[in-house]
Amino acid sequence: MREIIITKRFTFDAAHFLTQYKGKCEALHGHTFTLEVSVIGTPDKEGMVIDYTLLKDIVKEAVVDRLDHTCLNDLFDFSPTSENLLVYMADVLEPLLKTSRYRLHSLTLWETANNRASLQFP
Ligand SMILES: [Zn+2]
């Protein structure tokens, strides 16, 4: 059966500053981040890879609600670049979005309308 990719988009507001960086972003500033979570799998009898509501609940509880309206530097011992945040999100979400029928396909984090980082799962 063909595999389909399902994507849900989330936004959250958070502050950060970059610790190893010389330039504008070493100062505290905020972003409205956009996170896109893609799941790949074969549709069930209903014709769904994963219920969008279930995907929303899992990602909100495990990631989005924990980061929204925070200073990311207070939460992590790594520098909260988009790249490092994606690795953290991957570690949290991969086991939660893994069944015999579907799995995590990719994560994309938009820091601004023009800048995004992506992580793809094998
Ligand atoms: Zn920034």
Image (cartoon, rainbow, N blue to C red):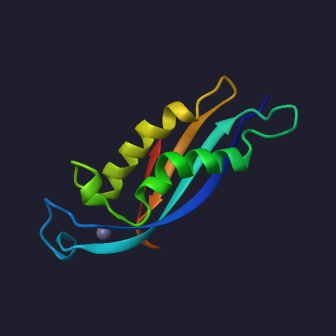
Taking the image as shown, residue 47 lies to the left or right of residue 64, namely right
Is residue 76 shown left or right of residue 13? left
The residue positioned 71% from the left and 50% from the top of the image is 53
Q: Position of residue 32 (x, y in %)?
A: 44, 71
Q: Residue furthest top?
A: 100
Give the residue drawn at x 66%, y 22%: 100
Q: Quadrant location of residue 20?
A: bottom left
Where is the N terminus found, in terms of image quarters? top right
The residue sitting at the right extreme is 46
Looking at the image, which is closer to me, 64 or 103? 64
Q: Is residue 121 visible?
A: no
Which is nearer the eye, 57 or 111? 57
Q: Residue at x 49, y 45 (%)?
A: 62
Residue located 39% across and 72% down the image: 31
Q: Is residue 55 left or right of residue 93?
A: right
Task: Give the x, y percent position of residue 115.
Answer: 40, 67
Q: Is residue 111 above or below residue 85?
A: below
Residue 95 percent across, percent down from the top left: 51, 30
Residue 92 makes an appearance in the image: yes
Ligand 1 rendered quadrant: bottom left
Q: Nearer the viewer, residue 62 or 46?
A: 62
Number of disc labels: 0
